[in-house]
Image: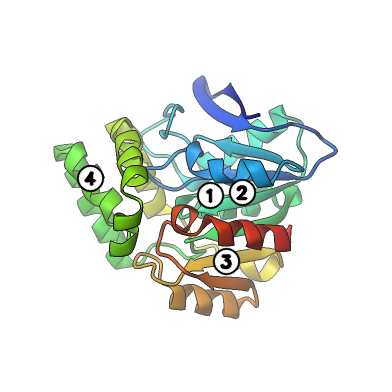
Amino acid sequence: MVLKENYSYKNTNISFEYNTIDTDKKTIVCLHGFLENKAIFNFLYPDFKEYNLICIDLLGHGESGCIGFIHSMEDQADLVFELLNHLKLKKVNLLGHSMGGYIALAFLEFYSECVDTIFLINSSSKADSETRKINRERGIELVKKNTNIFVQMAIMNLFTADAKKNNSDEIELLKNNALAMSTKGIIASMYGMKQRVDREYLTNIHENVIYLAGKNDELIRAEEIESEAKNSDSKYYIIKGGHMLWLENPKEIKKILKENL
């Protein structure tokens, strides 16, 4: 059974779901990506009943509100820490997809004593390149002019041609959920990602950072993740799929989690 609750963070509603909260169990905290919500991790609940599985709507996403005009990765990490404190959970495994991975690394920087293992799915420890920052600025300007067009384009750009064919219903749902987000929430996260700092050094310090790269990911390329992982001697997997591995290859994600938790 999946339970849903709300938590007040800085006078803002935060929505999260979980199967159990048991301090004697290991915990997995799931952090979704940009324009996504906690529901992307629903595929994990049936196979991870022996864990506390907690899925959070991050600031400005899903049913969670905004706390400002910029949601930094540190803001999001602080939210996760405060929620875990509220739930009296001391040590967790973090599973972050794309932006969720950036947040997981920010959490590791400030709350390393609370972290066992971090799984970075379609994510990187590096800061945005200058080109990526320029593209985010262009995206922000488009959101201000026409949020609907931006969301439609952004969601479709996350999928390979094959994934678009095979997951049309799921993509439509994802698009509709993203269109329900506020313009403020979308822009706040884009600024937060653009301003994030490079945290590659953390992967040299913390031995349990594990990368899951999509073989056909056109946003965060597998060869870049392979190089990044090798630089820090981190474990990595290159698996079939693009940038949305949680939808394209959930079976492989579950297998890797089971092997490494």
Q: Is residue 101 visible?
A: yes
Instruction: Indicate which disc, 1 or 4, sits on the residue closer to the N terminus.
Output: 1
Dot 2: element: helix
Q: Nearer the viewer, residue 20 or 114?
A: 20
Instruction: Indicate which disc, 3 or 4, sits on the residue closer to the N terminus.
Output: 4
Instruction: Indicate which disc, 1 or 3, sits on the residue closer to the N terminus.
Output: 1
Q: Are the two marked residues, 4 and 2, in contact with CB atoms closer than 8 angstroms? A: no
Q: Which mark is residue 152?
A: 4
Type of amino acid under label 1: Ile
Quadrant in which the C terminus is drawn: bottom right
Type of amino acid under label 4: Gln
Residue topped by disc 2: 107
Residue topped by disc 3: 211
Dot 3: element: strand
Type of amino acid under label 3: Tyr
Instruction: Indicate which disc, 3 or 2, sits on the residue closer to the N terminus.
Output: 2
Label 2: few (<14), some or many (≥20) within 10 Å?
A: many
State which mark lies toward you, 1 or 4.
4
Q: Are the two marked residues, 1 and 3, in contact with CB atoms closer than 8 angstroms? A: no
Q: Is residue 158 visible?
A: no
- Where residue 56 sits, quadrant-wise, is top right
Between the residue at mark 1 and the residue at mark 3, the CA separation in whole angstroms equals: 14 Å
Residue 25: image location, x then y, percent: 81, 41
